[in-house]
Image (tube, helix red, strand yellow):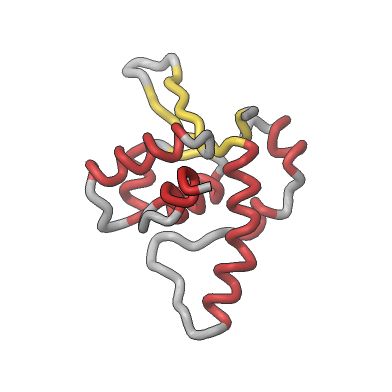
Amino acid sequence: MHGILDTISKKWALMIIAVIGNSGCAGFNELKRELGNVSSKTLSVTLRDLEEKELIDRRVLETTPPTVRYYLTVSGWELRELLIPLLTWVIKNGGHAEEGCPIHIHMGDKPIEEKKTEGFIIED
């Protein structure tokens, strides 16, 4: 339990999960822009940690130049769906949404099977 808990308890991990889930996938620069003041090194390390824990999948697309996109795995989507009520509770109890990283709940409304068929989920 400590391994995955250590990963998702880091400052940027849950925000990265949120941003990728908002659109179904994201590139490094998109994540950096959405998250605002995260350093490139911290973003790289956190993405690698999330990939090692099989919460996200890194795909290199065959474009010129090659493009890297990050997708949530089934476990990543399950985690994101659990985040929505937690963040709703935080906002309800005096918290405020971070600029640049809202969770758009409409993506959470789709069943996991539908997300798989649309290419938003990589099998664990």
- Pick whichever, 84 or 52, lies toward us: 52
Q: Quick one: which residue is furthest to the front in this view?
A: 2
Residue 59 versus residue 52 in the image, above or below? above
Residue 90 versus residue 124 in the image, above or below? below
Q: Position of residue 12 (x, y in %)?
A: 37, 54
Residue at 45 percent across and 20 percent down: it is 61
Quarter occupied by the C terminus? top right
Looking at the image, residue 91 sits to the left or right of residue 60; the answer is right
Residue at 54 percent across and 60 percent down: it is 103
Looking at the image, residue 3 sits to the left or right of residue 77; the answer is left
- Pick whichever, 77 or 102, lies toward us: 77
Among the 4 quarters of the image, the one containing residue 52? top left
Residue at 59 percent across and 72 percent down: it is 88
Q: Position of residue 107 (x, y in %)?
A: 65, 51
Q: Quick one: which residue is furthest to the bottom in this view?
A: 94
Residue at 65 percent across and 47 percent down: it is 78
Q: Position of residue 50 (x, y in %)?
A: 44, 39
Residue 78 versus residue 100 in the image, above or below? above
Residue 112 versus residue 15 in the image, above or below? above
Count of residue discs:
0
Looking at the image, residue 1 sits to the left or right of residue 112; the answer is left
